[in-house]
Image (tube, grey):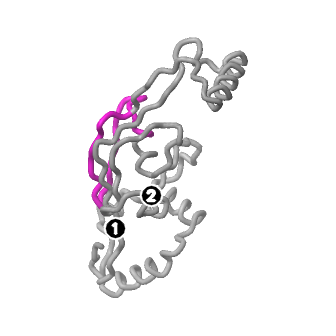
Amino acid sequence: MKENGVGICLPTVEVRFEHLSVDADCFVGDRALPTLANVVRNLGETALNRLGFRSGKKTKLTILKDVSGIIKPSRMTLLLGPPSSGKTTLLLALAGKLDPSLKVRGDIRYNGHKFDEFIPRKTSAYISQNDVHVGEMTVKETLDFSAKCQGVGSRYDLLSELARREREGGIFPDSEVDFFMK
């Protein structure tokens, strides 16, 4: 927990991931194309696989290989990489939203707790890129609009108390940060 300048401890989360690897079994070449013939063939092979017959050759595709890191609380984290480098897969893994057909190895912990001891969806989210937005809105206006649409949920009382104490304590936003947010 981090205490701000007005005596309220805000909840924080540290995310650690160690030796995280994600693999997928996939078809390559002509077989990877979504044609009607391939769909029918895939359905047939899936049925045979469930009956215990092995058919079809899939190739193992490594999406993430031995990735480790720490996302510290109260810090902005930027994830950069070229297309198809695994950025989305890493974020989905950290949010606990990977497709169940993927093979995941490694350790992910939230405040020292594993996934089965913690509910990541209460503290993390992955929102896929969707460029449908109002280009004339500033970052602050976009975030304000999002907050108004989604609400603050169970944190309303905490945020109200924080705002009240900041006003009483004469604490105002950093002018440089406030300038860029407008």
Residue 6 placement (x, y as % from top left): 30, 82
Q: Which amino acid does label 1 sit on?
A: Thr
Is residue 76 part of the magenta span, yes or no? yes
- Residue hosting label 2: 124
Amino acid under label 2? Ser
Sequence-wise first label, 2 or 1: 1
Which quadrant of the figure has residue 51? top right
Callout 1: helix, strand or loop?
A: loop
Foreground residue among 7 and 18: 18
Report the residue marked by disc 1. Answer: 12
Q: How far apart are marks 2 and 1 (CA)?
A: 11 Å
Residue 91 rendering spot, x and y as whole percentages:
42, 45
- Can you tell which quarter of the image residue 22 is in? top left
Give the quadrant of the N terminus: bottom left
Q: Looking at the image, is 136 positioned above or below residue 40? A: below
Q: Tell me, yes or no, if residue 31 can be seen here.
A: yes
Residue at x 48% of width, y 55% of height: 125
The residue shown at (42%, 63%) is: 118
